[in-house]
Amino acid sequence: MIMKRSFLFVLLVMLFLGGLLFAHGQQELTENIEDLSVNNKGLSYGVLENTNEFITLIDSYDNEVRLKKTIKKIVVHDMGSALASIRALDAQDLIIACNSYVKKNTTFFPEFSKLPIISEESQAVDSELILQLQPDFILSRPFYYQQLGDVIISEIPVVQLSFNSIESYKKLGAILDKDVEATEFINWIKSYTDIIDSRISKLDKEEYKSVFAYYGGEYGMSDPPPYGTFGKDNALRNELINRAGGISISADIEALLKSFELSKHLDKAVWQLSDGQSIKASLLFLRICEPKYIFLGEIFNALDYSSLLVIKEEIKKLINNSVNIFFSSHNLDIVAELSDRVIILKEGEIVFLPKEA
């Protein structure tokens, strides 16, 4: 249950707080948010024209897009951040179709699950359906934009918003004539991020918690393999974790795998690993979980010299991080090197028990 609750929290943060942190100029959330209802010119956030008939803006990917001022129908070809953002501005009734993302996430988007589906995952869109629906624009981003095809792009305006900055919400508010709602939403976000910032600013870096950012097929977020994570290239997700007082272990998973000499075995199941490699994989998992107590069996048996050194060093690191480790071994040299208390057993009976210090 801990993993499920953590995932749900991370997903909600991604959808609603999403990219407000660092991407696209790393705009600080501590800036003063102007009242969009009175700043209808919008030149400061990429709106070039805003008349009674048309609105022209620069989207998140530097494309100039011109739309009709009155928006009645939107097709969303994107993931949850776009759907959640439109809903946050109370404009969900304008969405007339979306991709198959909602079919896997009916818990979060029940109102969209019965809409027409314009594409299945990683497949070309249904151009005929989109042209038949005649939306005022398609909300997308580069990964999905390339699936739309030349016919759709030439016939229907496409706006690409990343929702990685406050500007994206300002632009969406201007497009939907929801400036007031956008301001309220931004200030609602800021009311929580200010609390988080205040609390986290009081922590030392040593107090930050190690986090494994999990997503996978169990929650409909991806196809197999069911257990995935975010690597170092996903700066937004890693910064979300850091902003909340965590350190993403998987942000540097390549370095971690290298330190355990497992980089060449990513395509193997655990049962396909050698004994030494399995032990390393287990210790890597323990590094992520940060337990207070660890019980180990005869982990030093039948190890090559390189694996023995790696495992001993990792145990020493765990001990230095105040982890209590109980292990059994017939190798007295290793016992003497790693232990501060030793209990000797013979045929299942304790024959030596040290006195309490």
Image (spheres, helix red, strand yellow):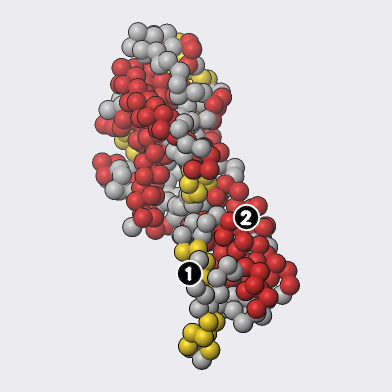
**Pick the front one: 331 or 164:** 331
Residue 100 visible from this viewpoint: no
Could you say which disc has been placed on residue 356 in the image? 1
Could you tell me which residue is drawn at 53 percent across and 89 percent down?
Answer: 346
Q: Secondary structure at mark 2?
A: helix
User: Of tags 2 and 1, which is closer to the observer?
Assistant: 1
Quick one: label 2, few (<14), some, or many (20+) residues within 10 Å? some
Which is nearer the N-term, disc 2 or disc 1?
2
Q: Label 1 is placed on what type of residue?
A: Glu
Q: Position of residue 277 (x, y in %)?
A: 63, 70
Left or right position of 256 against 106? right
Could you tell me which residue is drawn at 48 percent across and 46 percent down?
Answer: 209
Quick one: label 1, few (<14), some, or many (20+) residues within 10 Å? few
**Marks 2 and 1, how far apart at CA:** 37 Å
Q: Position of residue 65 (x, y in %)?
A: 49, 21
The residue that disc 2 covers is: 256
Could you tell me which residue is drawn at 31 percent across and 30 percent down?
Answer: 88
Tell me: residue 9, above or below residue 333.
above
Q: Position of residue 6 (x, y in %)?
A: 38, 49
Q: Secondary structure at mark 1?
A: loop
**Pick the front one: 94 or 336:** 336
